[in-house]
Image (cartoon, grey):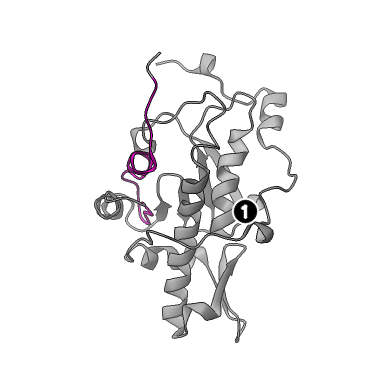
Amino acid sequence: MKQLALNRRKFISLSGLAGAGLVLGLSSKAHEARQVANLSFAGESFELTPYVVIEKNGTIIIYNTKPEIGQGVYQSIPAIIAEELEVSLDQVTIKQSGGEKKFGEMQFAGGSMSVRSEYENLRKVGASGREMLIAVASEGWGVPSGECYASAAKVFHKPSGKSVSYAALAEKAAALPVPQAPKLKDAKDFKILGKPSPRPDVPLKSSGKAIFGIDVSE
């Protein structure tokens, strides 16, 4: 079997393709993708790379792009992004990708590599979004970004206590340059990773609502 050579640059290029609205790519494709995205959705929803969509009504959708075969990626991949994006899993709607080209060529599982190979990059996706949303909020308030923080899908201003939702910030954030080296959280500050949480795929499988490969037809 031919081994697939994948370095960080290639992964980012594959996973940061064109999306809609707010596109947070960590590659040279980001600006081009953002231009395509803004034409596609007309501001009704905003996409943080193909993995994350923030709708104007506040719904936050995070996609799992790996096959769920019992290893738990249906939750773990969205959880990694949500941790850095500063949203709780209760605030997230998880959806499974359907092989769409915009998610890149790595929509497969094997060798227990789904999380190990993409952990840092997925964290950067969430962290970049957090920093861009904070930047928009701080500019709107006329305060330093260092006085602001993100939590529970909102940006807060520490001194005044003011807050604004991600949904209200996403459109303006789309016009900002994407941080290439966003600051990642310290592990001691994790709210999701390393903590027990119920797996959302279990009720789907138990009730027969889960979609499997055998259910798919042309």
Front residue of this view, candidates 119 and 132 = 119
Q: Position of residue 3 (x, y in %)?
A: 39, 21
Which quadrant of the view contains residue 9? top left
Q: In this view, does 143 lie above or below 107?
A: below
What is the chief secondary structure element of the magenta stretch? loop
Residue visible at 36% across and 54% down? 23
Instruction: State the residue at coordinates (65%, 32%).
Output: 201
| Residue identified by numbered label 1 | 91
Is 36 magenta? The answer is: no
Residue 11 can be seen, yes or no: yes
Note whether residue 56 is visible: no
The residue type indicated by label 1 comes to Gln
With respect to residue 77, does 182 lie above or below?
below
Q: Is mark 1 on a helix, strand or loop?
A: helix
Q: Residue at x 68, y 56 (%)?
A: 191
Question: Residue 5 magenta-drawn?
Answer: yes
75 vs 115, nearest the viewer: 115
Give residue 1's quadrant in the image: top left
Magenta span = 3-25
**x%, y% of residue 66?**
51, 31
Q: Quadrant of the C terminus?
A: top left
At x 41% / y 60%, what residue is drawn?
A: 181
Q: Using a 10 Å C-alpha cutoff, classify the residue at mark 1 as few (fewer than 14 neighbours), some (14 to 19) or many (20 or more).
A: some
Q: In this view, does 49 lie to the left or right of 195?
A: left
Q: In this view, does 27 lie above or below 133?
A: above
